[in-house]
């Protein structure tokens, strides 16, 4: 018979773009479309949905969950930018960074911009959202996505984040950074079977990604008024996750890890249990990692 991959069995996640619509109105729209609203989920088992059924997520207020076969790519609400098709785990970084409206924010490796549009929604389009990406094609896709999503607070630049100058006056009020750098993608369920047979080559690739990720992280922490930085990857390898964070904290003692989302079922590998992990089995998502770093209170440091 036909083998189904784990990706076909993951629920379909729909993030309501609150710049264009409200969750209640989108729920009503789907109900009028003949879909069956089951209320808010309270446990993982509630994500096991029959065709047409949908629920609201218990962690992310703007997230709706549908059965695995649902496809909204041709749906009016998708084409109009009212909904974003985004895995639940990948909604965590912007949600946890939670920049207030009016703040100045950097999305360091931003394209194709799902997290950028999420940040803009949280900021209610107020403030400044600097978004960088090295790849001009991906940046062009992003610009279309943001237009459709009604994002207006962004400033896009086709630029290497590592060459963005932290002391430039433009960034003097940046207090929040989202860093979602290139990674192995080993958490993406659809890519899992692609692990090469050449283990030495895989190890070399991981080591080179990890060194890039650490450089990006160290660079982000150099912005003078930075308060909080969220680091995320769609990798399941500790080399790109806990090990990068550990090395970064050793080099930057003025930052600490913030424990996030106590009710989340999967934590970073010991001892970095302040961080979150995500997986098909424990969270019904792609494999993912998120860490929240915060600048320590300086006056308290001086007393120590
Ligand atoms: N945050 C994006 C989203 O949610 O849609 C996904 C980002 S993807 C994991 C990583 C991105 O980093 C790629 O688009 C890649 O082109 C970009 N990138 C790689 N190296 C970079 C660099 N040095 N500076 C800026 N962007 C870079």
Image (cartoon, rainbow, N blue to C red):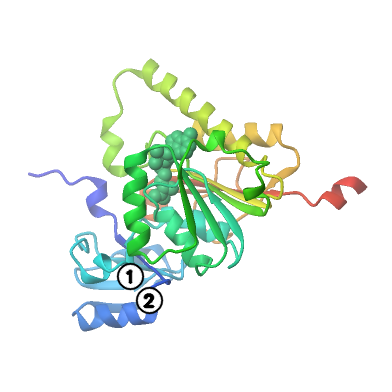
Circles 1, 2 touching at the beta carbon (< 8 Å): yes
Disc 1 on helix, strand or loop?
Answer: loop
Between residues 145 and 236, which one lies in front from this camera angle?
A: 145
Mark 1 near ligand 1 (CB under 8 Å)?
no
- Judge the density around disc 1: few (<14), some (14-19), many (≥20) Cα neighbours within 10 Å: many
The vertical placement of 135 against 152, above or below, is above
| Numbered badge on residue 124 | none
Identify the residue under disc 1: 82
Q: Taking 72 as reference, is 274 left or right? A: right
The residue at the far right in this view is 303
- Distance between the alpha carbons at the discs numbered 1 and 2: 6 Å
Q: Position of residue 214 (x, y in %)?
A: 57, 32
Is residue 235 among the parts visible in the rendering? no
Is disc 2 placed on a helix, strand or loop?
loop
Residue picked out by circle 2: 21
Q: Quadrant of ligand 1?
A: top left
**Residue 271 position within the rendered picture, expressed as x and y whole percent measured from the top left:** 63, 40
């Amino acid at each position: 018979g036909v083998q189904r991959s784990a990706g076909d069995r993951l629920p379909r996640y729909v993030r309501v773009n609150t710049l264009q619509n409200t969750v209640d109105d989108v729920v009503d729209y789907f109900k009028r479309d003949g879909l069956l609203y089951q209320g808010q989920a309270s446990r993982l088992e509630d994500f096991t949905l029959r065709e047409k059924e949908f629920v609201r997520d218990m962690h992310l207020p703007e997230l709706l969950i549908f059965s695995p076969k649902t496809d909204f790519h041709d749906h009016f609400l998708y084409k109009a930018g009212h909904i974003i098709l985004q895995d639940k785990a990948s909604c965590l970084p912007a949600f946890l960074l939670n920049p207030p409206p009016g703040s100045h924010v950097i999305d360091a490796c931003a394209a194709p911009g799902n997290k950028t549009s999420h940040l803009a929604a949280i900021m209610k389009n107020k403030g400044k959202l600097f978004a960088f990406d090295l790849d001009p094609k991906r940046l062009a896709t992003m610009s279309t996505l943001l237009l459709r999503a009604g994002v207006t607070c962004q400033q896009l630049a086709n630029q290497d984040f590592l060459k963005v100058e932290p002391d430039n006056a433009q960034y003097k009020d940046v207090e929040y950074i989202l860093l979602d750098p290139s990674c192995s993608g080993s958490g993406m369920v659809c890519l899992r079977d692609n692990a090469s047979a050449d283990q030495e080559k895989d190890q070399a690739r991981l080591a080179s990604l990890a060194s890039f990720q650490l450089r990006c992280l160290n660079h982000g922490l150099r912005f003078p008024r930075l308060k909080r930085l969220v680091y995320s990857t769609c990798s399941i390898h500790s080399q790109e996750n806990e090990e990068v964070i550990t090395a970064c904290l050793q080099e930057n003692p003025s930052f600490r890890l913030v424990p996030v989302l106590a009710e989340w079922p999967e934590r970073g590998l010991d001892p970095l249990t302040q961080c979150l992990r995500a997986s098909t089995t424990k969270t019904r998502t792609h494999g993912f990692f998120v860490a929240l770093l915060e600048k320590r209170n300086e006056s308290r440091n001086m007393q120590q």
